[in-house]
Amino acid sequence: MVICAVVNCHNRSDKGESIRFFRLPAVITHQGAQAQQLSSERQQKWISKINRKDLTPERYPNVRICAIHFVSGSPAQLFDQANPDWAPTLNMGYSNDKQVKCASSTSRYNRAKERSTRKRRRSKTHQELASDCNTSVVIEDQEPSEEVPGIEAQTELSTKDLENLEKKMKGLEKEVSQLKHDNTQQIEVIRHLKTEYGSLLFTQDSFKEDDGKVLYYTGLGSMKLFSTLLAYIEPYLKDRSSLTKFQQLLLTLMRLRLSLSGQDLGYRFQIHQSSVSRIFEYVIGVLYSKLKPLIKWPDRDALRKTMPMVFRKHYPNCVVIIDCFEIFIDRPTNLLARAQTYSQYKHHNTVKYLIGITPQGSVSYISSGWGGRTSDKHITENSSFLTNLVPGDLILADRGFDIRDTLGTYSSKLEMPAFTRGKSQLSGIEVEQTRRIANVRIHVERVIGNIRKKYSILSDTQPIDFLVSPDGSCSLLDKIVHVCCALNNICDSVISFE
């Protein structure tokens, strides 16, 4: 049961009336020095208002005061010290001369509250006037409107303030206008930089309508040709999160064309070096399987219909011009492999390939790789080259291809420059024949030089890993050579029809 501590107040909680009771305020010690001091003063004022001699500190926790002793029916907040309910004031049970006039206290509190409200309203009005700087305001000496209390004493000050604010706003408007102009320029600069940055990225959009860029990075003559090649092999390429199919093909052709390292390509395409190697090997395999049919031995009728004039005059039955070219490789650690790949002609470890060029300048045959020590004759006789010949075919070759007897078994003929060994000089007929052969055989050197120039990877030293084939199939270097020759065939020929 709770009993009100005020003298002569008989309210208690068991009477069934809905009367609220409030504890004696405690001293707050955990919210700062100001709260502690204010709560201590409030507690002492409550004790003073209760005015009981038997109220000792030990009984403070049990002291309760009912709601009838407060003007509003409940105590005010701690920091609302001007409120008459900051301490109990009504029906305190002692003589009237010691009681505080409740009506005067309430009136005084209400007046203070009204002054505070007017002050806030005046401050808000001044802020609204200051913010409306684009409106011309003229204030004359007249009675102020009742809707804006407290402004009557500041007519002259507000006029000066508004004039100053208008000047400041004009200056700010100029600054804003200048900032907008600068912002527009910056937007144009950013747009230009984005365009330049996009052109540096190896994306499909950066290569559109730029055949020169396509030629430099891929060796293909136009973007249309590159797009055709991409459309042909795109169904066989893997979907990768790191690179698009366009970028996979571009990366592969860039490595063939410029002989860029895996680390360089990794930085350009923002992928890891190991990813570059995996993508390159996979795309080379796809290109090899799909472009290998482009290296085709043509029919005799098709050859004669498109035979250049320089061949028609002296060698109308010529079907192929053959030669060998070598690619440098790293020095093998295995002694036998080192001996088999060492070329006495290049003074380096190499891999040798037999290449056949049609009179029109396209690659019609390319062999697998052989050790640099192997002779041209041995490669020609032991590769699949001879199986393409038909009776009556004429082959042009250099002096190292002494295969006249072997070609005789296929009813084919060999033309090569005359030997000077054992002769003081060549006869007139031999000189003329040698000159004729040299004039047409130079085309195979031009084609080989064009392939090497277009795809620089064939001119660099290749690692031994490119020669290893774990499953016994075609090595990576063989695939690279075949792909480079096939890509050369889809480009314009270096030999003129006339």
Image (cartoon, rainbow, N blue to C red):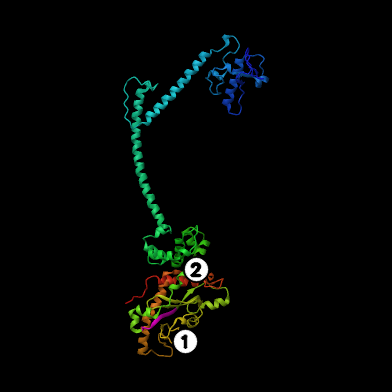
Residue 42 location in percent, x, y?
58, 20
Q: Nearer the viewer, residue 421 or 229?
A: 229
Q: Amino acid at mark 2?
A: Gly
Residue 342 location in percent, x, y?
52, 77
Q: List the single residue furthest toward the front.
A: 16
Whether residue 304 is in magenta: the answer is no
Q: Which mark is residue 406?
A: 1
Q: Amino acid at mark 1?
A: Thr
Q: Is residue 298 left or right of residue 383?
A: left
Residue 113 location in percent, x, y?
48, 20
Whether residue 321 is in magenta: the answer is yes
Mark-to-mark CA distance, 2 and 1: 34 Å
Q: Is residue 29 left or right of residue 386?
A: right
Sequence-first disc among 2 and 1: 2
Circle 2 packing at 10 Å, graded few (<14), some (14-19), many (20+), is some
Q: Quadrant of the C terminus?
A: bottom left
Task: Tell me the element at label 1.
Answer: helix
Query: Is residue 459 in view from this perspective?
Result: no
Residue tagged 2: 285
Q: Which contiguous range is marked in magenta?
A: 315-323
